[in-house]
Amino acid sequence: MNIIHIIPGSGGSFYCGNCLRDSKYVETIRSLGHQVVKIPMYLPLFADEHDIKDIPVFYGAISIYLKQLYPVFRRAPDWFDRILNSKPMLKFAAGMAGSTRAKGLEEMTISMLLGEEGKQKEELERLADWIATHCKPEIIHLSNALLLGLAHRLKERLNIPIVCSLQDEDVWVDVMKPESRNHVWKLMHEKTKHVDAFVAVSDFYAKVMKEKMKIPSEKLKSLYLGVDPSDYQQVDIKLKERYIGFLSRMNHENGLDILVDAFIILKKNERFNDVKLILTGGSTGDDSKFLRDIIKKLKHKNLYQDVEFCKDFECKGRNVFFSRISMLSVPVRQGEAFGMYQLEAMASGVPVVQPALGAFPEIVEKSGGGIIYEPNTPEKLAEALSKVLNDKELLEEKSKNGYKGVLEHFDIKNQTEKLMSLYKKLL
């Protein structure tokens, strides 16, 4: 089978669960003998992109931003576009403030969803031409519903089924001003008619998007994310230091300050003198002040020496990170549609401590690899962390259960076979 996955990139500036999800599926589909092409949009996917060096980044973030705001750039020569869309320029842009923020990009989001009626229609034709010339696919898989503006033209041009994943679109849309937010949800609903199947990453999120986008039940399916357990190294949890880890973009929305405040509470008790915090996941320019405030607070509490900020969160860096921590907590304020870091932690034998929000309870219950707390406050998180830190048997039990849960329910090979069955059914 010949498949295309169209994936918005993060530029490698922070841990991107969606980029990781799609790349793991692509690798596993290829291992089953199928041909898959990853097409990045807006920004490169990762710092190391060994398998897509010859594929251009479509809808380059700098170029479409300038063209959206200043019509004069729509008449810029091709050589100017090539400079703006070069991967060094895009990777530089990925770390800048506002590069991955919905606020201020409402008009562009709407324009993108309008597809051939939007201001990026020339780029849409360029994408359709490139796919038709180079790929001849049988299936196109869109990474998320914010890309639905592509669906009608690609379907019209190529006459093949289109699949769309659903994961955390609401995080982007619901922070917009009410007028823009309502318009975006309406457009996304209208575009569902051009898609043959939607794949939500959890039962929780399938219900959320069914309501928000009014997706017909026959088009909607839940399919959990997956990881390859052989990609991760297990270190006996009994031999580890009592280190708590955080893996995600280090910002307010992902609750890093909640974890830091919980850590400060823990350290007031002498029983936790040995406990340390290891933080990784990267950031953008938007997060600079937030991180400076975090560091300032830790220094004020004389705890900065007990916290480590790790810059390397790519493949090898994550394995080193998981080999050192004995539990992971990412207390996202609004919860998530899934949370890929949970599977990565459990595949490494590391239990998770998560708030009772979003799909976290569903994933933790399914895997047995962690505990849930509520409400999502520093006090309750400190209480939950304390419970696990003080009970070696519980920690070991959750470590073993989590790994077993990944094997049984979240193995990427099994999940990919389910996805391939959906593709075949559509064909």
Image (spheres, rainbow, N blue to C red):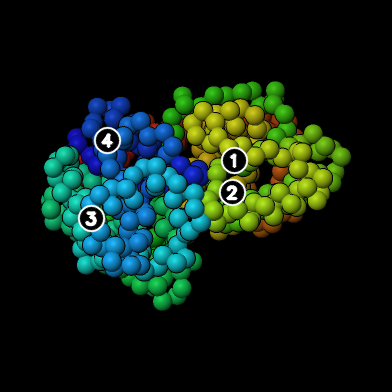
Q: Which label belongs to residue 250? A: 2
Residue at mark 4: 54
How far apart marks 4 and 2 lie (CA) works out to 31 Å
Q: Is residue 63 left or right of residue 319?
A: left
Counting from the top left corner in percent of width and height, residue 229 is at 47, 28
Three-letter residue code for mark 1:
Thr
As shown in the figure, which amino acid type bears the numbered disc 2? Met
Whether residue 138 is visible here, answered yes or no, is no
Kindly report the distance in space between the C-alpha atoms of the residues bearing marks 3 and 4: 22 Å
Q: Residues within 10 Å of mark 1 (few under 14, many from 20)?
A: many
Judging by the rendered image, the residue that carries numbered circle 3 is 77
Report the mark closest to the observer, 2 or 3: 3
**Contact, CB < 8 Å: mark 2 with mark 1?**
yes
Label 4 Cα neighbours within 10 Å, binned few <14 / some 14-19 / many ≥20: few
Type of the residue with mark 3:
Pro
Whichever of callouts 3 and 1 sits on the residue coming sooner in the sequence is 3
Q: Quadrant of residue 418?
A: top left
- Marks 2/3 in contact by CB < 8 Å: the verdict is no
Residue highlighted by disc 1: 280
Residue displayed at 55% across by 56% down:
286
CB under 8 Å between discs 4 and 1: no
